[in-house]
Image (cartoon, rainbow, N blue to C red):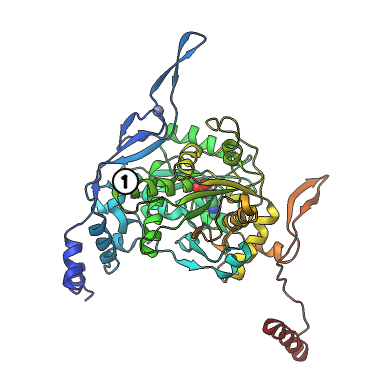
Amino acid sequence: MPMTMAERRNGLPQEVRKTLEANPGFADLSHLACIECETTYPSSEVIYKCTSTTFEKQNGNDSRGICGDILDVRYEFRETDPEFLKELWLARRMSNAPQDRSGVWRFRETIPFIDDPNSVVTLFEGNTPLFDAPVSAKYIGLPRLRLKHQGFNPTGSFKDPGMTAAVSIANSLSMEAVACASTGNTSASMAAYAKRAGFLPIVFIPEGQIAIGKLSQALDYGALTMQIKGDFDEAMGMVMRIAPKLGIYVVNSINPYRIEGQKTMVYELMEQLSWEVPDRIVVPGGNLGHASSIGKALHEMVELGFIDKMPRITVIQAEGADPLYETITSDDPNQLITVHAKTLATAVKIGNPISWKKAKNYVNETDGWVEKVSEQEIADAKAIVGREGIGCEPASALTVAGIKKLVEFGTDSPIDKDEDVVVILTGNVLKDPDYTVNYHMDRLYEDYVTSLNVLEKAGKIGSTFANAPIQVEADEAAIARIIEERLANARK
Ligand SMILES: Cc1ncc(COP(=O)(O)O)c(C=O)c1O
Ligand SMILES: [Zn+2]
């Protein structure tokens, strides 16, 4: 007979048992609020953008409009004693209850928007490792670097902690279908969680612009997958027009519950750092939901007394997909500058990011930075993270490339040489195998265009750290020579 939950709990040390029993932790203490005009909405309303009416003076006349800005989840937190919560979260690591094994729901007091634990849809997300990264640190020119690898999530990307939150809300609202536009990882994650919950996942992807690993996941998990002839920004527009008409729930990061789930990664990180706050947290920027979730987590952690200073949020974008960089360095950073996005890091190939204002506000609040990097810098940084024995997808490697670039600014650098930097790697190395193999075989190009039915390549990316396979006859002596030569080189 398998043990019951109560029996398992009874097997725990008494102190741990007492702590767990003191707090089941589920509650709905939330409402939604517009990030611009602060209009509030009940958490039960399916709404993505503020619908309140605004009045502006134009040429001396009153002009009416709709606010239209995005929403945040706000709380009246009930349990706020940091020392008690830290102890409770540690105690939950010894529990076998599904919500305690999840690296998101273990921290449920920080996201109290679900009061029925049965609504939770979990794949045991979170619980991702924090690695010391000496090879990357040396490459960058810092004494130490740590990598928090969100690619170790169940579908291989940082999207999973947000998706458990959004799909759990969809479950509590009794939705029958969920939809997203995606550069790949969101669709993989959504498809998995939706299927676990028994919903239909509907995916809109830009045709030919997502990595093969991600497409294969959406197909395998059974998503209705629509390849739109257009880019991500067009696919996103399509979802926002169609989903409300058909009563389908949108789980892109415009859905504020995605941001809530992603927030818990920062609690997990701080726990791994024994609550010693790093100087800087570095993330890649696409739709900018990730940077926003980190900012919101840090803001709330200071408010609740978990930490007393904020790490500087540093967002790195690809040169060809850099709307936040363009905006923040422009004369009017309150007006988004959109771009026609172009990068081989397809996960961040986004020119009109939905969460730009949230991310910009948190970069400013934490005295952070926004930088951009070239395709060559991304490719080389990715190979370095690979040599670390860790690996990541191209969009994640932006971070390492970006920090290297900032350190190389020398005395003008916004980074001190002895800073404690944590980089968030967002996606698993297996997500985009074509990119990796092409780099190592010295055939990675920025552009692949079909002209007169002939595939033409342009913008060759140098394979600085190539590790191509060696073709060799099945000849033992020849193979032994190659291995001995490599070993001798390694000993030098
Ligand atoms: C691997 C990876 N890194 C970074 C990003 C960018 O995250 P965000 O869109 O939240 O800025 C994405 C988004 O799809 C991604 O898949
Ligand atoms: Zn508003």
Q: Which of 474 and 388 is in front in this view?
A: 388
Image position, residue 156 (x, y; %): 50, 60
In this figure, which residue is indicated by the disc labeled 1?
Answer: 303
Residue drawn at (35%, 52%), measured in percent from left and top?
308
Query: Residue reaching furthest top?
Result: 60
Q: Regarding ligand 2, which quadrant of the image does it lie in?
A: top left
Q: In which quarter of the image is the C terminus?
A: bottom right
Query: Visible in this render: residue 61?
Result: yes
Q: Residue 120: x percent and y percent?
A: 31, 53
Q: Residue at x 23, y 48 (%)?
A: 27
Residue shown at the point (39%, 51%) measured from the top left: 309
Residue 434 visible, this orientation = no
Q: How crowded is mark 1: few (under 14 residues within 10 Å), some or many (20 or more)?
A: few
Task: Decide if ligand 2 comes within 8 Å of the CB at mark 1.
Answer: no
Please indicate whether residue 476 sits to the left or right of residue 350 in the image: right
Above or below for 94 versus 195: below
Q: Helix, strand or loop at disc 1?
A: helix
Badge count: 1
Q: Residue furthest front?
A: 411
Describe residue 450's horizontal placement relative to residue 286 as left or right.
Answer: right
User: Where residue 202 sits in the image (x, y, percent)?
Assistant: 48, 45
Q: Can you say which quadrant of the picture contains the N terminus?
A: bottom left
Taking depth in this image into account, of 296 and 278 the one nearest to the observer is 278
Q: Nearer the viewer, residue 39 or 166?
A: 39
> What's the residue type where badge 1 is placed?
Glu
Observer-nearest residue: 215 or 439?
Answer: 439
Residue at the limit of the structure toward the bottom, as seen here: 477
Image position, residue 87 (x, y; %): 25, 63
Question: Is residue 369 shown above or below 399?
Answer: above
